[in-house]
Amino acid sequence: MSNSLFRTKSISKILGDAETMQDDPHAGGGLKRVLTLRDLTFFGIAAIIGAGSFSSLGEACFKGGPGVVFLFIICAVACGFTALCYAEFASRIPVAGSAYTYAYASFGELFAWVIGWALIMEYSIGNIYVAFSWSDYFTSFLSRIGVHVPAYFTCSYMEAHQAVIENAGKAASMLNASTQELLNAWNNAPVIGSLRIIFDLPALIINVLITILVYIGVKESRNFSNIMVILKLCIVALVIGVGAYYVNPANWAPVNDAGIKSFMPNGFSGVMTAVSGVFFAYIGFDAISVMAEESKNPQRDLPRSMILSLVICTVVYILLALVLTGVINYRNFKDVGDPLAKIFEDTHVSWMQFLVSLAAVIAMTSVLLVFQMGQPRIWMCMSRDGLLPAVFEKIHPKFQTPSFSTIITGLFVGVPILFTDKTFVLDFTSIATLFAFVLVCGGVLLIPKKEKVPGKFNMPYLNSKFIFPLLVAAAIILLQVNNPHYFTGLFNINADDASLNVSTIILWSALIILSVIAFLKNLSLIPLLGLSSCLYLLTGMTGNNWLWFGCWLGLGLIIYFLYGYRKSKLALAAKAAAI
């Protein structure tokens, strides 16, 4: 049984199956190949610049201060190495499925299922956060043009209930505007029996509309996405330009709690606490690889579009973070869900507040679109391999989209909107994505080397035999010299730092093991650096993140062993061969 859990699907078989599906009239034919390099790059930008810049960036600035730009650079580097690994896989396996398909070819079926299950979190559950953020900006935009939506239709039940519990007995003068709005939602909501009717109506509506658009077709979705990307890049450029005029350089060296001026007022540890919000901003670039079967020239255009979109968006995020923390003190971003509007509110530039609200609505609509397109294609690929029922791979004969999977994705996003909140889904999504990135980088190390082919992406090979072990050794020595108690302190575990310390111990253990393997096997340096940086970012996740992620994986494994393990096409083929 243990060997069958790690049965791999060869690259030639993956390509052959995809070609068969493309010509299968019973499956509705294949997916339409309509996407160019520009389209794919715009999809990447659409997915990356959205909720991260217009919502989670505020909390990241509050936690890290101006120094949060270093975390953007670290995340960009980690994603850059990972993007090269994605690009290597995409050039060799240009089919839908993203990290799920890549894991099937490298680690085997069990890991493929785990990564597919994690991708459900990344795309579907991540879109819940984006839908909530979209709703915040949309209702803000409506209020600026004189349209008021009742508070009980603009927040989640969980948020309103939590606000009542935390603020019972407090005077109204002690509460901020957002808390008062939540309490108003609770107090004024319609009641059926003993149940208050509180849910985020705009978030539900946009989810339904996006699901319909994705169901209709990729060409229509592409045209809509491209228009959205052009508009939001123009507005973001205007935000950076106007905001730069109000920058006060003194805000880049604020006074910390110790009375010292610092670019990182909360220290580097404070910067790292923002990892969930910052990394969430980047997770969209891998959505490009899901569109492989709809790309005209996937082996050339997928790698280029991933790297282009990542570079463009990293520059945008760094400039935005510098403008935000330069215009007002970083402490003013606590519990701010619309940080770009906040800086123009404090500087009394009302016309920019209106424009930012409009830009955010556009930006997050495009994010919802790309994520909502990505998830059905993961379902479809898992179904093709027999790990999910055959209905998930059904292609609509007219629209040539994975119809049933698209509807299920819409339900996966829409139903939880009724009982979750933004904080929960933000952390949940980031840890799942980092886990997927770790497996992609590790997977590149396992697939056979190939000869360079002109016109296709070829990841540079740099022998890590000496470089990687020396880098790890140098890091250990520098840490020990600068902080002699660093490594011994990791083993002093208590309730407050258990997650950080345990994950850091695992990190260093993994780096030492990888150093030995790199020396013995002459591994490629780029995927090793991607693997290491993603493992490092995982140390910033909290114990609650790991707990919920473990529960989610546990549920996925139960489904796999009850259905996928027995129904897998590789398993059925093995049984047929044994007869």
Image (cartoon, rainbow, N blue to C red):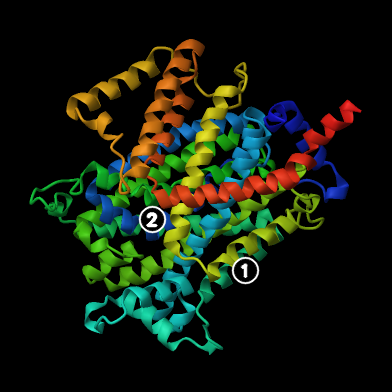
Would residue 144 be seen by someone viewing this image from the given angle? Answer: no
- Residue toward you, 446 or 167: 167
| Left or right: 167 in relation to 152 | left
Residue receiving disc 2: 53
How far apart in space, not on screen, are marks 1 and 2 (Cα)? 24 Å
| Lower sequence index among marks 1 and 2 | 2
- Residue toward you, 165 or 291: 165
Please tell me whether residue 532 is drawn above or below residue 267 in the rendered image.
Answer: above
Horizontal and vertical percent position of residue 488: 26, 30
Please tell me whether residue 11 is drawn above or below residue 296 in the rendered image.
Answer: above
Residue furthest out toward the right? 579
Please name the amino acid that badge 1 sits on.
Val
Q: Which residue occupies 9% across, 48% down? A: 260
Q: Which residue occupies 24% across, 83% down? A: 171
Residue receiving disc 1: 208
> Which secondary structure lies at badge 1?
helix
Horizontal and vertical percent position of residue 476: 29, 23
